[in-house]
Image: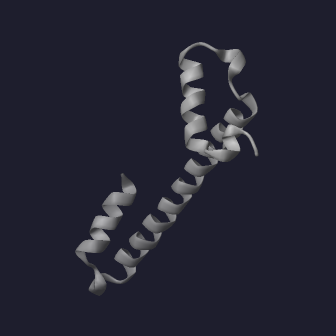
Amino acid sequence: MGTAYEKDVVAWAGEQAALLRGGKLSAIDVRHIADEIEDVGKSEQRELASRMSVLLAHLLKWQFQPSRRSKSWQFNIRTQRK
């Protein structure tokens, strides 16, 4: 059938959080928690790279296509910078 992690990762995460908060460290799923922490880091890196790419593209458009500037470009630049 599979582990709780394989069946419902959201429920598994809630269970693991409760175990951690309860100080029941011997009961936690160390391997999968470590995997999830690494995945979060990778996801954050991908998100940053994506936002930087969009920002750079819009800044280049803004600089080299002044006749096509729009409020949406301006909004997008502001959003990506945040």
Task: Give the residue at x 53% y 55%.
Answer: 47
Task: Give the residue at x 35% y 84%.
Answer: 65
Q: Residue furthest top?
A: 23
Res 64 → quadrant: bottom left
11 vs 62, nearest the viewer:
11
Residue 72 spot, x, y in % from top left: 28, 73
63 vs 2, nearest the viewer:
2
Residue 71 spot, x, y in % from top left: 23, 73
From the viewer's perspective, is 7 left or right of 71?
A: right
29 vs 62, nearest the viewer:
29
Residue 11 spot, x, y in % from top left: 56, 38
Q: Residue furthest bottom?
A: 67
Task: Give the residue at x 34% y 66%.
Answer: 76
Q: Residue furthest front?
A: 1
17 vs 35, nearest the viewer:
17
Tell me if residue 30 comes above or below residue 9 in the rendering.
Answer: above
From the viewer's perspective, is 71 left or right of 32?
A: left
